[in-house]
């Protein structure tokens, strides 16, 4: 059964406004394209280590049970520390976008700035730098991100 009324997990303060935080997570279990999936990663790791493949791939039920066990521990760490700092380094090691090149289109596409994604800012937004080292904090409410095309463009109101 799908819970159509998500339960807030952590109280969150954003720009001096206290709000509940609702976490939505998508895990790609079986679709190997366009990026990767859990079952492919498992198969590649086992092949690399010279181990046999399991007779059946990981099921949704097994993945959900394993995920919830890990998530509960991470949620506890976030709640007790009051922030993302204890998890940031591990998160960025697994993140797919570090050093990815994107374009920032400004002025209705007149200005095109090549940027390299470097991680996250201290406020949790996307951090990118241009060829001269200028830092850009990219906000989702002001930018449209399309990593498959390598494009970041300014939204026009």
Image (spheres, grey):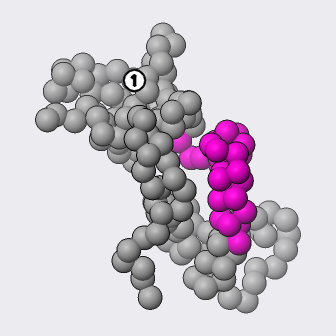
Q: Which residue is mark 1?
A: 114
Q: Residue at x 58, y 82 (%)?
A: 60
SS at circle 1: strand
Residue reaching furthest to the top = 132
Q: Residue at x 60, y 46 (%)?
A: 95
Quadrant of the drawing holding the N terminus: bottom left
Q: Is residue 46 magenta?
A: no
Left or right: where 123 falls relative to 50: left
Residue in the picture at 52% in, 68% down: 28
x%, y% of residue 63? Answer: 64, 77
Vertical relation: 49 (above or below) 89: below
The percent position of residue 155, horizontal first and vertical second, equals 22, 35
Residue 81 on the magenta segment: yes
Q: Where is residue 29 shown, x and y percent of the image?
A: 56, 73
On the question of residue 40 being in view, the answer is no
**Residue farthest toward the right in the current orientation of the protein:** 50
Q: Is residue 75 above or below residue 113?
A: below
Left or right of residue 136: residue 154: left
Q: Which residues are magenta?
A: 69-97
């Amino acid at each position: 059964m799908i819970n159509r009324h998500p339960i807030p997990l952590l109280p969150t303060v954003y720009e001096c406004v206290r709000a509940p935080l609702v976490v939505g997570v998508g895990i790609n279990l079986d679709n190997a394209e366009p990026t990767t999936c859990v079952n492919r990663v498992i198969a590649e790791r086992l092949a690399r280590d010279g181990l046999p493949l399991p007779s059946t791939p990981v099921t949704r039920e097994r993945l959900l049970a394993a995920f919830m066990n890990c998530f509960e521990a991470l949620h506890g760490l976030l709640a007790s520390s009051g922030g993302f700092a204890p998890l940031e380094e591990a998160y960025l090691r697994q993140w797919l976008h570090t050093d990815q090149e994107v374009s920032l289109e400004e002025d209705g596409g007149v200005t095109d700035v090549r940027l390299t994604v470097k991680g996250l800012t201290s406020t949790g937004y996307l951090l990118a730098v241009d060829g001269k080292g200028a830092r850009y904090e990219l906000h989702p409410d002001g930018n449209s991100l399309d990593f498959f095309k390598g494009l970041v463009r300014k939204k026009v109101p």
